[in-house]
Image: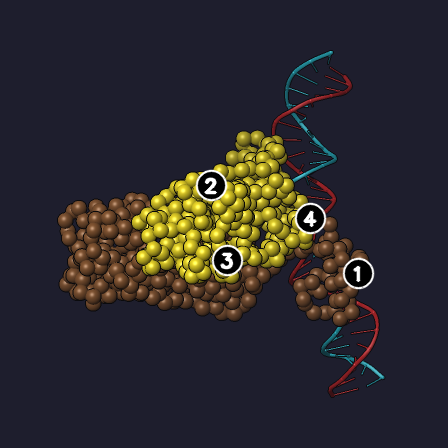
Chain colours: A yellow, B brown, C cyan, D red
Amino acid sequence: MKANLEDIAKAAGVSKMTVSRVLRGGTGFSDDTRDRVVKVAERLGYVPNKLAAAFGSYQASTLVGMCVPRLTSGLFAHVLDGVDRALSRLGYQLMIGANNHSTEEEEAWVRQIASWRPAGLILSGRNHTPATVDLLRQVAAPVVEIWELTTSPIDMSVGFSHYDCGAEMGQFLLRRGRRRAGYVGALARADVMGQARLEGFKAVLAQAGHPLVDQEVLMDMPGFYAGYYGLETLLARGSDPDVVYFHNDEMAVGGLAYAQAKAIRVPEDLGIAGWGGMEAASILPKRLTTTVVPTTAIGKAAAEALVARLKGEPGQEVTVVPTRLVPGETG
Amino acid sequence: MKANLEDIAKAAGVSKMTVSRVLRGGTGFSDDTRDRVVKVAERLGYVPNKLAAAFGSYQASTLVGMCVPRLTSGLFAHVLDGVDRALSRLGYQLMIGANNHSTEEEEAWVRQIASWRPAGLILSGRNHTPATVDLLRQVAAPVVEIWELTTSPIDMSVGFSHYDCGAEMGQFLLRRGRRRAGYVGALARADVMGQARLEGFKAVLAQAGHPLVDQEVLMDMPGFYAGYYGLETLLARGSDPDVVYFHNDEMAVGGLAYAQAKAIRVPEDLGIAGWGGMEAASILPKRLTTTVVPTTAIGKAAAEALVARLKGEPGQEVTVVPTRLVPGETG
DNA sequence: CTAAGCTACGTTACCGGTAAACCTGACGCA
DNA sequence: TGCGTCAGGTTTACCGGTAACGTAGCTTAG
């Protein structure tokens, strides 16, 4: 890089500090000086050095870190997009990472990102290792926990209740006359949030006197094939469900494919419900019964809460974003 | 942050420089000294300051910037994932951005990222504004252009030829006996690469004496609905194609849905071909005829080319990753 | 026996910003 | 006339690392 503040200062006949103030849009200089400085900066092709700025003064960092479970998740891609749009518009940069649903990997990521002294952090989920919490305290930057709602966040939280999602779907399926519900999930050990949906679902069913008849949780990625084979396994056991709630839409679509392959009529013989609102599910001939999650809105809200805090405004501690149960034609 | 190198140095009874050398795994200290320093660093909960390191010495940056067209693209999510896995394993951090298929937005992003003095950059596509190229020269960091192959990259390139993808699909459809091919695309102005596929497709058809009978390019996002309505528009014009090549899989699936709605038999009455290898297309009853792009491999190759260059190894200038035409049952 | 070389450090000088304190002349005002 | 105030600056002192170079003490080749 050729030019720095010093070079501009010399060429404009002022001090480095004045250049700094002008370029950051501060006060304490005449219009004449500003014009001169700006012109020289442009002429020299000045590229600011955020490294130096952030290093010299911790207030000056515009770096935000965000960690998601998987970068290939369609849902989180939209959250990421919401965050990125909001942040880049406000002049912040986004450093990302993936934790593969592991709090240990999250800790490793936080350790890395902490060494960049970020202005703020966005984490997915509310489960963290003690060491992570400790690191976050040391970083002393605003933290937003997204996706799963916490009533007692480390700092701030934006999300919804997975338990309520499951409960709401349970109520809906009961209203539609379903009495023998089953569940097919995946990756139970790692994905705490899917577990929470199952809990809510089960609780409502039990309370209504029609408890879950069977569940199949595969130790596998929650995708199309897990849904396909999960439903196959469930039905093979003879528990004879009249509706199956899936971990997510991708698995539900896999279940639908299995039903079609075996000439099981949906929704007459078997109801199928998913979760998440996968875009691609729109390609199905029948609209999937599911819960739509406002992914982009979550990202936007998280970014805005973070920036509000950075600007010294109080900032919402807990933001609840509403999910929406979409009835569809499969449930 | 409480502890810095100085604190560790004092507590261990050595100089700051020795601590720096120990923690970076260098040489020039005894085993005894190393053990003492490492122990003290751990006890004090030392968190390194990459900001200071990168600022003090430009060789020390482990920051890589990556710009994709859209963060919500399933294909690029996998590229991103491939890059992130490869980089984080090697101790690098990833800063991301989206350019919305606009070279101007890309320029704005490069300008932002340049101020962080990144160790390397990954850009999508080979079209850049002159100012972008200028900035890249100033940053003087390795640059990898991915996705669309360039024979004359700014620095390095990893990708495949969109023109060849289109040409290969053209040849395939001709072999299957198609003689009246149409094309449905979207966002022609912004998406140069889709355009390249169309060119390759057209060239092969024309050469075989069965030129493209009609094309419909919507000024819209290339998604399910664009495919649906695009095919409707095309067919309404009466050009009577026996196969339609779509901009990508999502649009092809939309086209399939239209065909199904209008009781057009696929592939008997009309062939349908897509591009990109969308995961979700696996939920279709018939496998889509398409070209699968090795997204994760592209990301991995790009990251590895970058790191090789950073380590002083020569690094592949141009890496061609092979795409794979998947016949399917719709073409 | 001595010069050269090696090991294991220590010293110094930056990198390019920003905060905070300080300066200075012009002006208003009692 | 003297003093406070304000605009419009300048000066100084860091931030926490790393590169380059210096050096004491020991080893070893010639």
Residue at image position (66%, 49%) is A133
Q: Amino acid at mark 2?
A: Gln
- Label 2 vs label 3: CA separation? 22 Å
Question: How crowded is the residue under tag 4: few (<14 C-alpha within 10 Å), some, or many (20+)?
Answer: some
Along the viewing direction, whichever of B197 and C25 lies nearer the viewer = B197
Residue mark closest to the camera, 3 vs 4: 3
* Mark 3 secondary-structure assignment: strand
Q: Nearer the viewer, mark 4 or mark 1?
A: 4
**Chain of the residue under the numbered disc 1 shown in the image:** B
Check whether the beta carbons of the residues at disc 2 and disc 3 lie within 8 A of each other. no
Which amino acid is tagged 1? Ala
Residue pictured at 56% horizontal, 52% vertical: A192
Which label sits on residue A217?
A: 3
| Residue at the spot 69% in from the left edge and 50% down from the top edge | A134
User: Disc 1 versus disc 2: distance between alpha carbons?
Assistant: 63 Å
Q: Which residue is mark 4?
A: A138
Q: Is residue C19 above or below residue B42?
A: above
Instruction: Write down the chain letter for disc 4.
Output: A
Q: Which residue is mark 2?
A: A171
Marks 2 and 3: same chain?
yes
